[in-house]
């Protein structure tokens, strides 16, 4: 007797064969949202996937950007056991720029089939499930910025298309090789609903918008977007970086989340025509929850040491915990559209955030605000960078991790195993940095002192 998994894999093999696909790339997000994966020859799929998934060492979740295994519980200490990557067959997409290759997202499960507790996709699914059980359906439109670079780490990175004043322009002026046009077309064909692209505020910086949808699908598309942009850049001999603040002289790259909640029949629960702001009280509770939990949310939305250099006065990346009606200097901006388009724009995150965890944490913050019927402070009007007007965000990663660990309500929703894996991983990063001599210290001290 064939199992359901075996039958599904057989059907998939048939389908891919008929579309001329001979390799299936299986990918998933590790703890920091980088993609891990493997290319599988389609004719051998039954062998690889027939029993529910393909084995990966659990320690892969916990490797640093430099490739070292960080000692998170369940990895090195447990003898580096396996977890299984189980393809989610609803996510198969042909990769338009790689002939004969399709991509599929995987859920990571324990060998006994239970979801793996530190799998970001599973965590988001469980947060969304909790909301949906109360007929609250989270909808997200992700917006990510990035820099395109030339050169290499040994010769030094240069910003591609460096020129002054190319603030929100399209065309070869800020993009001499027309790369954005090519990226936009490829991404649209990839099925991740890329809708628009332009040169961003700073030299060499770009933004591509992707449409909104239910939270898990939106996170899947944001996750695929980042890998895809990096791949497309490599094809063009460039490097795309989503680092929060890669240059001292230019601004950072944000990962803004347009967020709303609808009911199961897709009716907005954020709009209320009768209210003076056009926002329902549920929307205000959601805003209040996000503000109340912001110090902890920063750990997932601003997850690197570098992330905190993006914030500051006059940066378009608020350093205060506040909100405002169509006010871009606030952390939570309420865009002016109302009716079905009523939404909040959480501008907290930077582009290094793991899309699954960033979205899971924002949804969880909103959910808590709704559950507890929290009321937000009055919205900020005018200039929003005045530190006397609102609480400050954590000033560094260490403070954000402390806030996350102290936030018992958020921990309850996101799960203790995820929080402790994440905090352990990130404290290892802090520890390594604390002992590293940086260029700044050499410039500041070496000659003069
Ligand atoms: Mg932008």
Image (tube, rainbow, N blue to C red):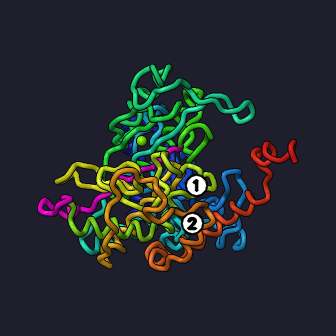
Q: Which residue is the site of mark 2?
A: 400
Which one is in front, 335 or 355? Answer: 335
Residue 423: say if magenta.
Answer: no
| Number of numbered discs on residues | 2
Kind of element beneath mark 1? helix
Q: Choose top left, top right, bottom left or bottom right for residue 158.
A: top right
Residue lying at 37% horizontally and 65% vertically, measured from the top left: 363
| 136 left or right, relative to 158 | left
Position of residue 56 measured from the top left corner of the image (x, y, whole percent): 60, 59
The numbered mark, 1 or 2, whose residue comes first in the sequence reads 1
Q: Main secondary structure of the magenta part?
A: loop
Is the N terminus in the top left, top right, bottom left or bottom right quadrant?
bottom left
| 104 left or right, relative to 398 | left
- Visible in this render: residue 12? no
Q: Choose top left, top right, bottom left or bottom right for residue 15.
A: top left
Kind of element beneath mark 2? helix
Do the residues under discs 1 and 2 have CB atoms within 8 angstroms?
yes
Residue 257: say if magenta.
Answer: yes
Q: Which residue is the site of mark 1?
A: 308
**CA distance for labels 1 and 2:** 10 Å
**Can you name the residue that lies furthest to the left here?**
274
Q: Is mark 2 within 8 Å of ligand 1?
A: no
Q: Quadrant of ligand 1?
A: top left
**Can you name the residue that lies furthest to the front here?**
388
Position of residue 202 measured from the top left corner of the image (x, y, whole percent): 50, 34
Magenta stretch bounds: 252-278
Which one is in front, 60 or 380? Answer: 380
Q: Choose top left, top right, bottom left or bottom right for residue 400.
A: bottom right
Which one is in front, 207 or 348? Answer: 348
Which one is in front, 78 or 336? Answer: 336
Position of residue 194 measured from the top left corner of the image (x, y, whole percent): 36, 39
């Amino acid at each position: 007797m064939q199992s359901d998994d075996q039958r599904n894999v057989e059907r998939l093999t048939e389908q891919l064969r008929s579309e001329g696909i001979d390799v299936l790339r299986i990918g998933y997000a590790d703890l920091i949202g980088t993609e891990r994966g493997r290319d599988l020859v389609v004719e051998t799929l039954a062998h690889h996937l027939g029993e529910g998934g393909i084995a990966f060492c659990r320690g892969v979740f916990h490797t640093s950007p430099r490739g070292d295994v960080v000692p998170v519980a369940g990895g090195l200490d447990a003898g580096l056991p396996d977890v299984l990557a189980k393809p989610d067959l609803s996510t198969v997409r042909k990769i338009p720029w790689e002939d004969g290759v399709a991509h599929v997202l995987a859920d990571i499960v324990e060998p006994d089939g239970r979801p793996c507790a530190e799998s970001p996709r599973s965590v988001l699914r469980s947060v969304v499930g909790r909301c949906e059980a109360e007929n609250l359906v989270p909808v997200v439109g992700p917006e990510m910025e990035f820099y395109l670079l030339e050169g290499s780490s040994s010769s030094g990175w240069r910003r591609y298309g460096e020129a002054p004043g190319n603030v929100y322009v399209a065309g070869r002026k800020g993009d001499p090789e027309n790369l954005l046009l090519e990226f936009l077309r490829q991404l649209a064909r990839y099925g991740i609903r890329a809708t628009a692209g332009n040169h961003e505020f700073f030299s060499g910086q770009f933004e591509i918008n992707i449409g909104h949808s239910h939270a898990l699908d939106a996170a899947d598309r944001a996750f695929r977007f980042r890998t895809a942009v990096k791949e497309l850049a490599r094809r063009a001999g460039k490097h795309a970086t989503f680092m929060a603040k890669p240059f001292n002289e230019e601004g950072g790259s944000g990962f803004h989340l347009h967020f709303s909640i609808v009911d199961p029949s897709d009716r907005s629960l954020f709009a209320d025509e009768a209210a003076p702001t056009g926002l329902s009280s549920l929307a205000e509770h959601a805003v209040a929850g996000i503000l109340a939990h912001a110090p902890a949310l920063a750990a997932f939305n601003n997850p690197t040491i570098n992330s905190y250099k993006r914030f500051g006065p006059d940066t378009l990346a608020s350093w205060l915990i506040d909100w405002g009606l169509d006010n871009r200097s606030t952390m939570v901006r309420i865009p002016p559209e109302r009716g079905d388009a009523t939404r909040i724009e959480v501008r907290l995150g930077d582009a290094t955030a793991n899309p699954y965890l960033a979205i899971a944490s924002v949804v969880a913050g909103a959910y808590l605000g709704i559950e507890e019927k929290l009321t937000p402070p009055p919205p900020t009007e005018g200039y929003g960078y005045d530190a006397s007007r609102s609480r400050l965000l954590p000033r560094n990663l260490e403070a954000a991790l402390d806030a996350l660990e102290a936030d018992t309500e958020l921990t309850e929703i996101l799960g203790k195993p995820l929080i402790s894996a994440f905090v352990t991983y990130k404290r290892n990063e802090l520890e390594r940095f604390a002992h590293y001599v940086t260029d700044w210290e050499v410039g500041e001290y070496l000659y003069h002192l």
